[in-house]
Amino acid sequence: MDNNLLLFFAVMVAVLALVLILLYLKKRNRYHPSFNVIAIVAYVVTLVAYMTFFVYSF
């Protein structure tokens, strides 16, 4: 369980870092077409990580 928890937090930190980088890039280039796709992928990965964490925690 400890290893899964550490993995979960590592994934969360990675996703948050990715989102921050994407927000920075969006600020520099507001109408970049690939931003929406990458943001949706990051959001889905975050949801999957949360669901996996809750499934393993119960």
Image: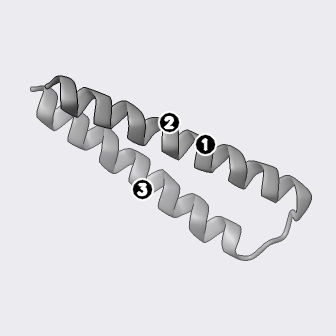
Which secondary structure, mark 3? Answer: helix
Say which residue label 1 marks. Answer: 17
Q: Position of residue 14 (x, y in %)?
A: 50, 44
Mark 1: secondary structure: helix
- The residue at which mark 3 appears reads as 44
Res. 6 image quadrant: top left
Label 2 element class: helix
Rendered image quadrant of residue 16: top right
Instruction: Identify the mark nearer the N-term, 2 or 3.
Output: 2
The residue that appears at 31% across and 50% down in the rendered structure is 48
Pointer 2 with pointer 3, Cβ within 8 A: no
Q: Residue at x 86, y 63 (%)?
A: 30
- Type of the residue with mark 3: Val
| Local crowd size for mark 2, using a 10 Å CA cut-off: few (<14), some (14–19), many (≥20) | few
Q: Taking 40 as reference, is 49 above or below it?
A: above
- Using the numbered discs, state the Cα–Cα distance from disc 2 to disc 3 in whole angstroms: 15 Å
Question: What residue is shown at x 26% (from left), y 41% (from top)?
Answer: 51
